[in-house]
Image (spheres, rainbow, N blue to C red):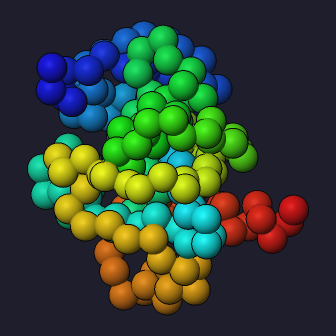
């Protein structure tokens, strides 16, 4: 099954499930759905950063400081966070990601999804999916900050990162 054919839950502005649709249809029609964003750090505290492949359905070839993706139909945010982190990092046995907060990403009509942000420590050797990740590295936080203005980042990941910085500053 292709990514476009995966069935996902469609949700309303309160994050209540109101239906289901194939992912490709949800994207094409701009239906609100659920996503997870997992910030993975290695033992040295460096952030996993990657560049998406050119074949991705959304935001192809852009950089991201999160692993994650769309929550499947009937799947919880927590289940999706672990599944997506293991899939994208190419590992098994990852600790359960820690949920930090959830927000409604809204970039205008048809570009809105509920976004749950997590963090996880990954001490395992990573082997990212070649279908999803064109380049990757664990970067020090200072380098991620410097690259924010140099690289083109996925807009929802950038919004999540800005909220994560504010969340940590307030904590």
The quarter of the picture where residue 24 lies is top left
Q: Is 37 placed above or below 75 here?
A: below
Residue at the spot 58% in from the left edge and 78% down from the top edge:
141
The answer to which of 25 and 134 lies nearer the viewer is: 134
Residue at 54% x, 25% y: name it: 79
Quadrant (top left, top right, bottom left, bottom right) of the N terminus: top left
- Who is closer to the viewer here, 167 or 81? 81
- Give the position of the C terminus as an image quadrant: bottom right
Residue 50, above or below 82: below
Q: Nearer the viewer, residue 42 or 9?
A: 42
Whether 134 is drawn above or below 130: the answer is: below
Identify the residue at image location x=61%, y=54%.
Answer: 121
The answer to which of 30 and 118 lies nearer the viewer is 118
Question: Horizontal and vertical percent for residue 113?
Answer: 48, 38
User: In the image, 4: left or right of 170?
Assistant: left
Is residue 161 shown to the viewer in this render?
no
Q: Position of residue 53 (x, y in %)?
A: 18, 57
Q: Is residue 108 left or right of residue 127?
A: right
Visible residue check, residue 15: yes
Residue 40: x %, y % from top left:
54, 56
């Amino acid at each position: 099954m292709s990514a476009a054919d995966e069935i996902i839950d469609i949700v309303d502005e309160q994050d209540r499930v109101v239906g289901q649709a194939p992912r490709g249809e949800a994207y094409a029609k701009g239906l609100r759905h659920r996503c997870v964003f997992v910030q993975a750090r290695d033992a040295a505290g460096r952030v996993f950063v990657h560049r998406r492949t050119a074949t991705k359905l959304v935001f192809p070839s852009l950089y991201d400081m999160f692993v994650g993706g769309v929550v499947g139909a009937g799947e919880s945010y927590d289940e999706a966070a672990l599944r997506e982190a293991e899939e994208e990092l190419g590992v098994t046995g990852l600790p359960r990601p820690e949920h930090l907060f959830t927000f409604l990403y809204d970039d205008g009509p048809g570009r809105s999804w509920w976004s749950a942000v997590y963090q996880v420590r990954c001490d395992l050797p990573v082997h990212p999916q070649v279908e999803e990740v064109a380049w990757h590295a664990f970067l020090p936080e200072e380098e991620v900050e410097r690259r924010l203005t140099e690289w083109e980042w996925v807009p929802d990941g950038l919004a999540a990162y800005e909220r994560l910085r504010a969340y940590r500053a307030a904590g």
